[in-house]
Image: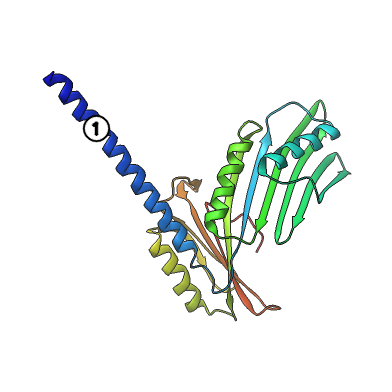
Amino acid sequence: MKKFAVILLGALWVLAGVQLLADKDSREEERIIEVFGKVGNSAQSSVVEYYGTYSGDYLKTDERESLLGNIAQELGLTKDGIHITREHENGRYETKLYKEAGKAVSSLRFITVGEENDSRQYIIINLAMDADMESALAYRKKLEDIMEGYVKDSRSSANVIGRYDGKLTLQERDTVADGLIEEMGARIVTENRDMRLYTIYAYSPYISDYEIQDGEAVNINIAMYYNEKEDQTYLYAAVPLVGLDY
């Protein structure tokens, strides 16, 4: 009886420890999301990007369209308003499913390079929306779960885009970036800070995934550029890397 009580007590301690770790992870995730929420001084937008090598057999045109349609359905995209285009040039075939609904734009592409007996097939997905990083991370996770059975060698990112009025000076950019990095408990891995190319790669222990660049783990990427026509400075912040053109 005493032995059973000891075992039971030990099990309870293990469960309590697991719960504490889960609570800690949840708090850390909330902390990161709160920090990303401070990006920009106006409404944010976000983009989820996904890229992977298709792991199945060679697909013909109608099969590519069917596959993209299935993925769109799993993402919750309704059929109304969906457009499908096909392009073929120099041995490269692209089937694209596109939908625009309000400020949300979804693009799913299936790309085939080569012919049936010697081909490479890829899936590229881009989901743009008026939303914060919390929504972007949720969609990224959903997309990764959906695509798990379709692809190999995949990469994905959740990006939030914020805007600042006017042209931020280099010192102002540094103040914004350093503040975000400090609040995320991150350390800078590599950086290039000038007005023409401003980008920082960092690592935070509070974010579970990462990519390796030059032998170092990276899971936060911050980039800035000035849009002269709009007179606004754009800040891109991503987990783990910015995949967007800026």
Foreground pick, 163 / 94: 163
Horizontal arrangement in the rendering, residue 26 relative to residue 155 (left or right): left
* Residue 210 locus on image (x, y percent): 48, 46
- State the quadrant of the N terminus: top left
Amino acid marked by disc 1: Leu
- State the quadrant of the C terminus: bottom right
Horizontal arrangement in the rendering, residue 36 relative to residue 156 (left or right): left
Q: Residues within 10 Å of mark 1 (few under 14, many from 20)?
A: few
Residue extending farthest to the left is 2
Location of mark 1 (residue): 12
Residue extending farthest to the front is 1
**Is 41 located above or below residue 109 in the figure?**
below
Q: Quadrant of residue 8?
A: top left
Q: Residue sitting at 59 percent across and 48 percent down?
A: 139
Q: Residue sitting at 67 percent across and 39 percent down?
A: 74
Camera sees residue 205: no
Foreground pick, 223 / 78: 78
**Is 240 located above or below residue 177 in the figure?**
above
Foreground pick, 34 / 77: 77
Horizontal arrangement in the rendering, residue 231 relative to residue 27 (left or right): right
Mark 1: secondary structure: helix
Q: Quadrant of residue 62?
A: top right
**Is 134 located above or below residue 212 in the figure?**
below
Camera sees residue 103: yes
